[in-house]
Image: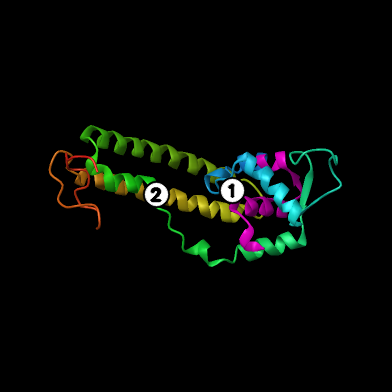
Amino acid sequence: MATDLTLPDLVVLSLLGERPMHGYELNQELERREARDWAGISRPQVYYSIKKLAASGHVLRTGEGTSRAGPERQVFRLSAAGRRALSAALAREEWAVQRPPPPFLTWLCLSGNAQPEDRLRLLARRRAFLEAELAKERATLGEILADTGPMVAPAAQVVRLVIRQWEVELEWLAEVERSTSFGGPRTGPIAGGAPSPELGTQNSEPL
């Protein structure tokens, strides 16, 4: 069933929909496309998914490779059942309504309990991280646009979105740094309501 397919399963099915591959080649392709930035799939998960999808008939062994080879060297292709299951899984409503909380925002809402020097250090660390990621994504976009295949156009759109997100967050972070008084009292409680406009300004007992 489509609902039984995990995210690693869907990534494997999508790549095999482009061409037959063995497990090692799948992992190489994920590395080349930096897919783990958006899919969060590990090397062992690729092999586990291949084994699972082969057992369910979603992928089929080809005549390439040796029958005694493990999943890293056996070549698999997408079956008709696998293509239907992939299509059905990508039609689910939850793709459009997920909102996982970014850890940095969680930290910011709790940062009134951190030491002032630690708040300054972590804000600076976040800025350095964003700047490095922005540079990386801009380079990645150039590499994607130089590639070919059915995933190029959507991948480029994803990277463009990430670039915009990093740019917007850098602007927002500058506002946070300007508006936050790290030595003064906090203007309101954090728990149970919206974050205070003066986040990170108290020196109270820890939560």
Residue 51 image position (x, y, % from top left) = 72, 47
- Among the 4 quarters of the image, the one containing residue 202: top left
* Colour style of the rendered protein structure: rainbow
* Lateral position of residue 90 relative to residue 160, left or right: right
- Among the 4 quarters of the image, the one containing residue 82: bottom right
The residue type indicated by label 2 comes to Pro
**Residue, disc 1:** 145
Q: Give me the C-alpha separation between circle 1 and circle 2.
A: 28 Å
Please give the range of residues in magenta. 1-27
Q: Is residue 64 visible?
A: yes
Q: Is residue 149 visible?
A: no
Select label 1 or label 2 by which is in front.
2
Q: Is residue 93 above or below residue 182?
A: below
Q: Earlier in the sequence, mark 1 or mark 2?
A: 2
The residue type indicated by label 1 comes to Leu
Residue 113 image position (x, y, % from top left) = 23, 41
Determine the main secondary structure of the stretch shown in magenta.
helix
Residue 192 image position (x, y, % from top left) = 25, 57
Residue 26 is a magenta residue: yes
Mark 2 closeness class: few <14, some 14–19, many ≥20 residues within 10 Å:
few
Give me the residue at 56% from left, 44% from top: 36
**Residue, disc 2:** 102
Give me the residue at 14% from left, 50% from top: 187
Residue nearest the viewer, comparing 102 with 150: 102
Give me the residue at 71% from left, 38% from top: 24
